[in-house]
Amino acid sequence: MKAKLCYGDFYVYKLFDQSSCYYPYCTVPYQSFQVSGQTETSITLRWDNVNTKIVSFILEFNGKDTNISAPNGDGPIFYTITSLTAGTKYTFTIFSVFENVRGKATNITAVTAPQNPQNLRQSTQNESSITLQWNKVNNISFVLQLDGTETSITATDGDGPVTYTFSSLMAQTKYTVILFSVLENVRSSGQKLTVVTAPPNAKNCKASGQNETSITLQWDKVNTNVSFVLQFNGTETNISAPAGDAVIHHTVSSLTAGTKYTFTLFSVFENVRSTGVNITAATGMIFNFFNL
């Protein structure tokens, strides 16, 4: 042990091979070197102040030294390293410094947050499920959050997109999903997407009347938020839901007499269609009595 008189009014002591002391001259133990946060391009480190103005620090990483002065007060010290690469592991070494003499080194390894997945999209849906797809990010894992519930997903082998299906959902419902990339338990900032399940098909769909050139269809309204698309002969007609609970009637005209037609009716919610229901009906025949 060595003693040293400092500024004429107090002594500090140098202790050799003390596991609890990180200074060449030991006054206050150095501890709590840790990561307090990270982004894709930065890592913030935290450590306890030594509770004296005569100790500074040197932070070493990537072969470079950074001098850090101890702030006033007894609170912890925070230091942010910027301009880093996303999804990358770094090793940092901290030294306490007393009168230009470095103390014992303390190392920590930390990673920057990975990049968000790209091209998150709703690929398919029905009344009770939604399938999502997104591009891979260097074979790392993911966390998918649906209305607060989280699911961990491991990336599959190969170069194709990652696919995941949520099931047991409610029909005609809007959901918010957030997708995170995860590297060594560090998450990306997250990519948000609003998705919807398909509405139910209309009920009691039928032909309620026809003549030689038109067919009238009818069906029950689904609800006020659901419109319809009627498809036949390669054409589509948009039909708004009327007010109230009345049965919906729609007449298709300019048809050919004595012809069978197949109509497909879709319910539509937030631009998402139901599976569709088919209605088959025929126009009436034209009889020429003068030729009888």
Image (cartoon, grey):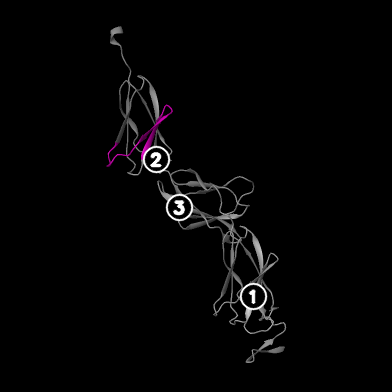
Front one among 76 and 264: 76
Q: Are marks 1 and 2 in contact (CB under 8 Å)?
A: no
Question: Disc 3, disc 2: CB below 8 Å?
Answer: no
Question: Upstream in the sequence, badge 3 or badge 2?
Answer: 3
Specify few, some or many for label 3: CA neighbours under 10 Å numbering under 14, 14-19, or 20 or more: few
Q: Is residue 232 shown in magenta?
A: yes
Look at the image and say whether residue 261 sits in the magenta stretch: no
| Quarter of the figure that contains the C terminus | top left
Mark 1 or mark 2, which has the lower sequence index?
A: 1
Query: On the image, numbered disc 1 is attached to which residue?
Result: 57
User: What amino acid type is highlighted by mark number 2?
Assistant: Val
Q: Secondary structure at mark 2?
A: strand
Mark 1 to mark 2 CA distance (whole Å)? 64 Å
Looking at numbered disc 3 in the image, what kind of residue is underneath it?
Thr
Q: Secondary structure at mark 1?
A: strand
Q: Residue at x 29, y 37 (%)?
A: 247
Q: What percent of the width, then of the height, locates residue 59? A: 65, 71
Residue 177 in view here? yes
Q: Nearer the viewer, mark 1 or mark 3?
A: 1
- The CA span between labels 3 and 2 is 19 Å
The residues colored magenta run 227-247
Front one among 129 and 184 = 184
- The circle on residue 228 is none
Q: Which residue is drawn at the image coordinates 29% and 39% (left, top)?
A: 242
Local packing at callout 1 (Cα closer than 10 Å; few below 14, some 14-19, many 20+) is many
Compared with residue 276, is residue 8 higher up or lower down, i.e. above or below?
below
